[in-house]
Image (spheres, helix red, strand yellow):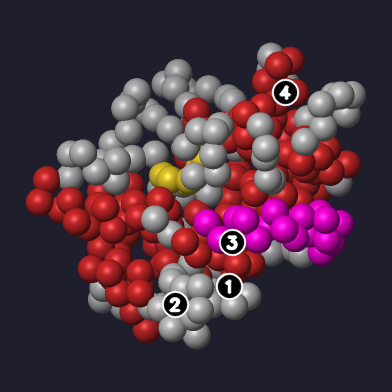
Amino acid sequence: MGLCLAPAMLLLLLGSPSSAARNRCLDAAEACTADARCQRLRTEYVAQCLGRAASGGCPRARCRRALRRFFARGPPALTHALLFCPCVNAACAERRRQTFVPACAFAGPGPAPPSCLAPLDACEHSRICRPRLLAFQASCAPAPSAPDGCLQDQAPGCLRAYAGLVGTAVTPNYVDNASARVAPWCDCGASGNRREECEAFRGLFTRNRCLDGAIQAFDAGWPPILQDQPDVHQDPEHSLLQVSSADGLLVGSSLLSMLPVLALQPLL
């Protein structure tokens, strides 16, 4: 069955070779279009995420599964360029924010974001999400002993771990088209006596200088990253992330109980 999409949506998601206004997110989209594997995997997740479930809603599970395949099997230089392309205006930033069809993969199903405890609890019981979140916590953790608070050469691993969360229960995204701030679709307004745990989780994205620095470092390294397209074929569910320094904490511990530990744990 073919997919019928509005022309404006297709141009936003897949790029337009004839666009006069150039920006790096458009360049990333066109580079992906020119690469057969990247384009095939991106077309797959666009089709899934813009489709309709039998119930009439968004097929979120299929959408997120296709997104995990895209970031696991696509050329990392191109998939990361799409996700972290630097922007200097709202049009570019909106393209970046819409990269993986957030109406299905990120937001909803209700009009207001839920408590962050809901996706966090779901992640804790997910064999896909749990190790990825642990890897993100470890890979983007601050290092108090480092001069700038983050380990040297930490940025690439931090960005890989962040990309690994896209398509999970705690999928993050850019919060607007006026900044590079990121967060999951949730808040802590209704977290009750677990407010501290909720804020600790959300702070991994909203108050993480190492993640912010990694995104900025991608901007600085843009030209070689875009040109370097390693041919890597990997398992879509488990290849992006390897839990290293967090391995010893996995057994018998909840994600919530580990948040304060991992927030301060340096990546060795």
Q: Is residue 168 above or below residue 40?
A: below
Q: Residue at x 47, y 61 (%)?
A: 209
Dot 2 crowding, Cα within 10 Å, few <14, some 14–19, many 20+ = some
Q: Which badge, 1 or 2, comes first in the chain's sequence?
A: 2
For the residues labelled 3 and 2, the Cα–Cα distance comes to 14 Å
- Asked whether the residues under the numbered discs 3 and 1 touch, taking CB atoms below 8 Å apart as contact, a structural biologist would say yes
Q: Which residue bears the numbered disc 4? A: 10
Q: Is residue 134 above or below residue 185?
A: below
Q: Which residue bears the numbered disc 2? A: 143
- How many numbered marks are there? 4
- Asked whether the residues under the numbered discs 1 and 2 touch, taking CB atoms below 8 Å apart as contact, a structural biologist would say yes
x and y percentages locating residue 29 in the rendered image: 77, 38
Q: Nearer the viewer, mark 4 or mark 1?
A: 1
Query: Is any atom of residue 95 visible in this view?
Result: no
For the residues labelled 3 and 1, the Cα–Cα distance comes to 8 Å
Q: Which residue bears the numbered disc 3? A: 214
Q: Which badge, 4 or 1, comes first in the chain's sequence?
A: 4
Instruction: Name the residue type under label 3.
Output: Ala
Q: Which badge, 3 or 2, comes first in the chain's sequence?
A: 2
Dot 4 crowding, Cα within 10 Å, few <14, some 14–19, many 20+ = some
Q: Which residue bears the numbered disc 1? A: 154
Per the rendered image, the range of residues in magenta is: 212-230
For the residues labelled 4 and 1, the Cα–Cα distance comes to 35 Å
From the viewer's perspective, is 87 left or right of 258? right
Instruction: Name the residue type under label 2.
Output: Ala
Q: Which mark is residue 70?
A: none
For the residues labelled 1 and 2, the Cα–Cα distance comes to 10 Å
